[in-house]
Image: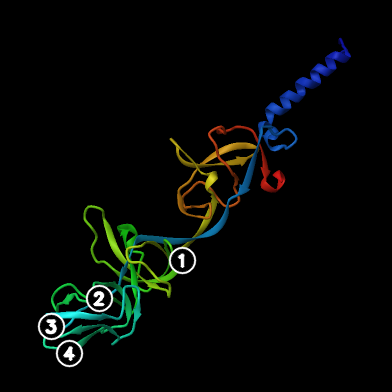
Amino acid sequence: MTYFTASAPSRKWLAAVAGLLSLAASPTLAADDPEVAPKGAAVTVLKAAKSCFANIVEVSGTIIPREETQVRPERMGLKVSEVLADAGDTVTAGQVLARLTLPEGGSVTVQTPVAGLVSASTAAVGAVASGKGEALFSVIARSEFDLVGLVPTRDIGKLAVNQAARIKIIGVGEVDGKVRRLSTTVQPDSQLGQAFIGITTNRRLLVNSSARALITTGQSCGLSVPLTAILYGSAGTVVQVVRRARVETRRVETGLMSGGQVEIREGSQLVEGDIVVARAGALLREGDPVRAVTAADVK
């Protein structure tokens, strides 16, 4: 029998071949071993976690008087002799607003039947007043106002009388309100229905001011990610996650949004605990090697 002995260089070559064959036999080892994991660009990541979102219906429209009373004298042919109230004044029920002179002599008074805010006045000394003509005064009963706005059909069904609202009025700020009345029909061309939101405030409001009401109709709890993690493209709405140091794309269906966060609805491919790329981008593609870092690591 013949024997041979390998030289030192030959032994090194054989060891290298044996190592390559070992890796080929276990292809997942290199991917799972952090020491030999693929290296790539650093990306900031976070975990997909649960949070709750308020379901809010928005109603935009204008401020109108809830009830307006027209104040006139009971007979014709009277002349205004004295004006005792003007537009913008707050009046009480029975308060005298003007005095008028009778043709036959003497005078009568014009009183408001309701308390409220005088919204308009045409009364002027020497002017002729009539029981059927233009009103001397218009009074907003009890100084009550409504926000009247249009709501899409898909949202009007979520509203109900007495739901609380926060109303933002231009020039006034935020005030409280409550759903007072909802229309029973919608406009056929726009599919919008009217909603009347009663306003509760002591502040002076201007008729026809623009306003917007936010009405919380419920709450939805589930997974959420930052809006920046959502990527829109030909493949649909997706997020990019990091698994075994490589980028994977997951299809998602988005829902409510609040504070820069987006609700991920059930049926999406994302699950709680997935490592999500915080700022998705077209430069990252399926299978790209990356190094995941958290926001804390960046600081």
Q: Is disc 2 placed on a helix, strand or loop? A: strand
Question: Mark 4 and 3 residues: CB-CB less than 8 Å, in contact?
Answer: no
Q: In which quarter of the image is residue 182?
A: bottom left
Q: Is disc 3 placed on a helix, strand or loop? A: loop
Residue identifier under label 4: 106
Distance (Cα) linking label 3 and label 1: 44 Å
Q: Where is residue 21 in the image (x, y as percent from the top left)?
A: 72, 24
Question: Mark 2 and 1 residues: CB-CB less than 8 Å, in contact?
Answer: no
Q: Is residue 68 visible?
A: no
Residue sitting at the far top: 2
Pick the residue in front: 52 or 64.
64
Residue identifier under label 1: 174
| Numbered circle sitting on residue 137 | 2
Distance (Cα) linking label 4 and label 3: 14 Å
Q: Identify which residue is drawn at 23% across, 57% down.
A: 187
Is residue 25 positioned above or below 261 on the image?
above
Is residue 155 positioned above or below 123 on the image?
above
Distance (Cα) linking label 3 and label 2: 16 Å
Pick the residue in front: 19 or 173.
173
Q: Nearer the viewer, mark 1 or mark 4?
A: 4
Residue identifier under label 3: 75
Q: Identify which residue is drawn at 53% across, 52% down.
A: 261
> Neighbour class for label 1 at 10 Å: few (<14), some, many (≥20)?
some
> Neighbour class for label 2 at 10 Å: few (<14), some, many (≥20)?
many
> Neighbour class for label 3 at 10 Å: few (<14), some, many (≥20)?
few
Q: What residue type is labelled 4?
A: Gly
Q: Is disc 4 placed on a helix, strand or loop? A: loop
